[in-house]
Image: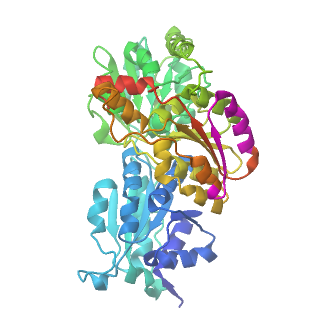
Amino acid sequence: MSKMDGGQLVVKALLKEGVKHIFSLSGGHIAPIYNVSLDAGIKIVDTRHEQAAAHMAEGWSLVTGEMGVCAVTAGPGLTDAVTAIANAQQSNTPLLVLGGRSALAENDTGALQDIDQIALMKPITKWARICHHTHRIPEYVAMAYRQALGGRPGPVYLEIPMDIMYAKVDEGDAPFPTNYRTNSRPNGSPEALAAAAEMLAKAERPLILAGSGCLWAGAGDALKAFAERLGVPVITRTSGRGVLPDSHPLAISGSMLHTMSPMTMADMILALGTRFNFMLAYGKFFQPPMRVVQVDIEPTELGFNRGPDVGVWGDIKLVLEDLVNRVPENPDRPWAREAKQMVDEAIKAERATLDLDAVPIHPRRLVEDVRDVVGGEAMFVCDGGDSMLWGAEAFPAERPSAVISTGPLGCLGVGLPFALAAKLAEPDRHVVLLSGDGSFGLNGMEIDTAVRHDLPVICVICNDQAWGMVKHGQEMLFGHDRTCGTELGVVRYDLMAQGLGGYGEFIERPEEIKPALERSLTYGKVSCINVMVDPTLPHPVTKYATESGLL
């Protein structure tokens, strides 16, 4: 009988899950995985930093719906990835992290890169385990998938010590589990569904908030059918952007300030897989007599910060497919048109106050030019503080994951790794990153990764020469002469891109933006359009959040 080492068992288990890519940075502890992947048809996408590798794996999950896999070596390899793993945990994104470790036989001897990695991982993952026996590797990979994808998704961590990874066992002694995941999902109790339907039937101004849970439930079609039957306006949020296309007549898109009026004027909120955290003022927007129906796959989320009038524990797709048959038709509800008109007029009024031909360049001019040049079929990634806000509200989300950004961790630096993962998954679409200059610096060396793996993403730097959101907060809180540690100056990321083998342009005037973007579309390699924007303009949400204590 043939022998298999730990690397072979890992790769065979991943192949059974349909894995095509492992995002990684090399190291001796995980070398057997690399060796086997060469012949197994799994591509190792190697990065310049483990944080970027784990961010790329999360980006892959967001764009494809398939769980991304990241492999990192022991000690600093894993600690470098901690921020990205925590981001996935806060965003409820499924992610498998394979971690190397010093040999079990060297425990407590001062081995190279030996730290208590399980203790590090437990607070920021759904599940963290160490495999002590080579023949059990397939079993542990199966467990990891079940844990990551069951219920509310999230990252999981599987640690394989070096002696377990390199050891060989008889193939017959390492069985591969079957039928270890089920498609069965909870649908909500009949009592809760009946109560929710009754409340929806009585509401005059209902509003749907569709969050990331809608993405992972694959609830787009069910949401569309439900909203159209009741004539209910829909705000898609966070990773839920695009589950109902922005162009749909019932879809409302804009910044938090734009959508605040319909959120506070509604008489009932149907919250679908969205958390009442700081981004929704901890549920304070939704005060009685407003009623709340909350649906979530995670039962402990029901009642978080704002207790619902009706809480439904269940899969959002199944719950909507049930509820649509319990509620009366009302497709021409006037409230839906009123709510959308409120937001459209707020956006129009705000835009009318802006000088979009000004020098320095207004950030809104930049994002509109990007949108106009690359078109609605592109994929957009937004990274940073103010720059993320400018982009997320203006870029169109016509499909799930068409516009992605960081989650509630507020993690900067996700942009370029997310964009590279998106391009890898969707090679025939334009992928555009809009990044602040500060956030781009965190993982900017991944331009080298883009060059090496032929991933021609377009990086647009919204360069205000500072950690803008923090700087503006300091100005508002302490005075314009009291900023500290937030000034960056003019960083020439365009030259950095050129030095690493990409394309770069430096832009200072608004009329230069579109021609530069058009040139980058034809270049065929990663490009960096470094745009100097007005450093004095905080996004309105930044101003509101600072003054109200949310930042």
Q: Which residue is at the front of the view, 120 or 320?
A: 120
Residue 527 position, x and y percent, is 65, 48
Residue at 50% of width from left, 19% of height from top? 232
Judged from this view, the residue extending furthest toward the right is 522
Residue 130 position, x and y percent, is 33, 71
Residue 522 visible within the image: yes
Q: Is residue 513 shown in magenta?
A: yes
Q: Which residue is at the front of the view, 286 or 429?
A: 429
Above-or-below relation of 109 to 499: below
Residue at 47% of width from left, 19% of height from top? 258
- Position of residue 106 in the picture relative to residue 10 (left or right): left
Q: Is residue 104 shown in magenta?
A: no
The image quadrant that residue 519 belongs to is: top right
Residue at 46% of width from left, 48% of height from top? 413
Residue at 41% of width from left, 36% of height from top? 273
Q: Which residue is at the front of the view, 334 or 38?
A: 38
Judged from this view, the residue extending furthest toward the front is 481
| Residues drawn in magenta | 499-521
Residue 192 visible within the image: no
Residue 398 position, x and y percent, is 62, 33
- Its colouring scheme is rainbow
Residue 550 position, x and y percent, is 31, 29
Above-or-below relation of 74 to 299: below
